[in-house]
Image (cartoon, rainbow, N blue to C red):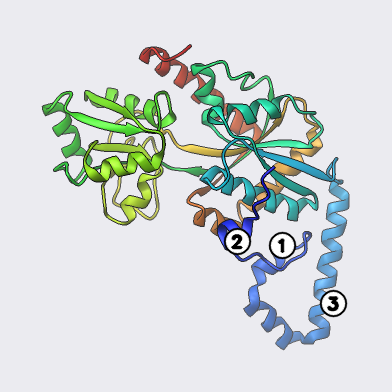
């Protein structure tokens, strides 16, 4: 079990609030608390805090206690990666909001399938949860025997965040926008190379889908990780990539930002269009980070986690932590999440079968 602390990984400040009132002190901030002290006096401020604490306690009692005291949050990736960081943020947030001890356990291997299978076989009492990416449920089951059924063996609880991919090209390729990129690709069939983190990965399949809609032939070069793909683009060994890791390079202007897949958008890049806006109907390939549990979890436990994460998704402090971790908040409740996963599962089935990759 990995015991790296969240503070060691992120160096983020936390609200000095009690588990019952994180939203209050985060919202008030130092300035508001000083104002209250000046206007009403220390006694009145203390009375207000005590009253709100009592109200929060009553609300928690009315909602009921979470069924277990300690929850193992399985993160099916190695410690230190983006998925692990988000998992620790979520575990920390749920601990504060539910008053329950959430402990992160890293169970890596097989692109997340080993950890997911472990959770699928865990007791459905709320003591074991999974913080994982959507590819485990939408693409992996089509590529190999993962040891679980993506929908029958899990309870969809809530989606927390997303990592939007970006289509970028190497500076060595003389294009400045998507229109020029498409024109170049059509004029030079088979000459373009692109990288991804592996055959059948979400980035690979999403890129193939995009190229088909554009009518471009290009050669796929698989790498072992996103850092290697980025380096290949920077050196010109491959001419383009579509991955969340490309966003950081676009910020530094070391690559040419061309578009964002699907109908997504990135607020910090207002001039970078979505593929959908330009008339290209392709899957987004966006990476989601979600909380899942074993099939058959109690409705009250599911509801408590879903509600806590929905409230967290509107908390500026939590949003700031997610942003610093390189992802954006994207809340979806359990029903919406399962519907979205099933839709992507079917789409990837079609694409992977067409590529000859489906098992």
Examine the image and state in which quarter residue 87 appears: top right
Viewer-proximal residue among 238 and 300: 238
In the image, is 330 to the left or to the right of 174? right
Of the 4 image quadrants, the one containing the N terminus is top right
Q: At x 59% / y 34%, what residue is drawn?
A: 108
Q: At x 68% / y 50%, what residue is drawn?
A: 3
Q: How many marks?
A: 3
Residue 300 position within the rendered picture, expressed as x and y whole percent measured from the top left: 81, 37
Q: Could you tell me if residue 128 is visible in this image?
A: yes
State the CA–CA distance, disc 2 to disc 3: 25 Å
Q: Which mark is residue 22?
A: 1
Please give the residue where the numbered disc 3 appears in the rendered image: 47
Sequence-wise, the earlier of marks 1 and 3 is: 1
State the CA–CA distance, disc 1 to disc 3: 18 Å
Classify mark 2: helix, strand or loop.
Answer: helix
Residue 51 position within the rendered picture, expressed as x and y whole percent measured from the top left: 85, 69
Sequence-wise, the earlier of marks 2 and 3 is: 3
Residue 129 position within the rendered picture, expressed as x and y whole percent measured from the top left: 71, 36
Please give the residue where the numbered disc 2 appears in the rendered image: 317
Q: Could you tell me if residue 260 is visible in this image?
A: no
In the image, is 151 to the left or to the right of 136? right
In the image, is 68 to the left or to the right of 309? right
Q: Are marks 2 and 1 in contact (CB under 8 Å)?
A: yes
């Amino acid at each position: 079990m990995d015991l790296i602390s969240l503070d060691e990984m992120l160096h983020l400040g936390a609200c000095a609030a009690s588990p019952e009132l994180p939203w209050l002190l985060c919202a008030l901030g130092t300035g508001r608390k000083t104002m209250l002290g000046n206007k009403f006096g220390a006694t009145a401020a203390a009375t207000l805090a005590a009253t709100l604490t009592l109200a929060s306690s009553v609300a928690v009692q009315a909602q009921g206690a979470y069924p277990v005291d300690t929850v193992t949050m399985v993160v099916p990736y190695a410690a230190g990666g983006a998925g692990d960081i988000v998992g620790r943020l979520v575990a920390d947030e749920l601990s504060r909001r539910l008053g329950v001890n959430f402990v992160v356990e890293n169970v890596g291997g097989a692109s997340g399938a080993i950890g997911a299978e472990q959770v699928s076989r865990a007791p459905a009492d709320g003591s074991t949860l999974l913080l994982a990416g959507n590819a485990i449920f939408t693409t992996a089951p089509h590529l190999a025997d993962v040891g679980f059924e993506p929908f029958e063996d899990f309870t969809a609880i809530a989606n927390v965040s997303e990592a939007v991919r970006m289509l970028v090209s190497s500076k060595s390729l003389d294009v400045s926008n998507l229109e020029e990129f498409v024109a170049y690709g059509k004029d030079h069939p088979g000459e373009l190379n692109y990288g991804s983190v592996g055959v059948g990965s979400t980035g690979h399949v999403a890129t193939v889908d995009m190229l088909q809609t554009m009518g471009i032939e290009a050669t796929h070069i698989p790498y072992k990780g996103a850092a290697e793909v980025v380096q290949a683009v920077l050196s010109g060994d491959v001419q383009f990539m579509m991955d969340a890791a490309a966003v950081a390079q676009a910020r530094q202007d070391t690559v040419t930002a061309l578009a964002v897949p699907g109908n997504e958008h990135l607020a910090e890049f207002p001039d970078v269009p979505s593929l959908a806006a330009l008339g290209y109907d392709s899957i987004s390939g966006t990476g989601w980070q979600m909380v899942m549990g074993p099939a058959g979890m109690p409705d009250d436990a599911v509801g408590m986690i879903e509600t806590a994460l929905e409230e967290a998704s509107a908390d500026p402090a939590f949003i700031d932590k997610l942003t610093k971790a390189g992802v954006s908040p994207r809340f979806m409740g359990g029903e919406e999440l399962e519907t979205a996963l099933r839709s992507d599962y079917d789409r990837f089935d079609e694409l992977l079968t067409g590529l000859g990759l489906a098992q």
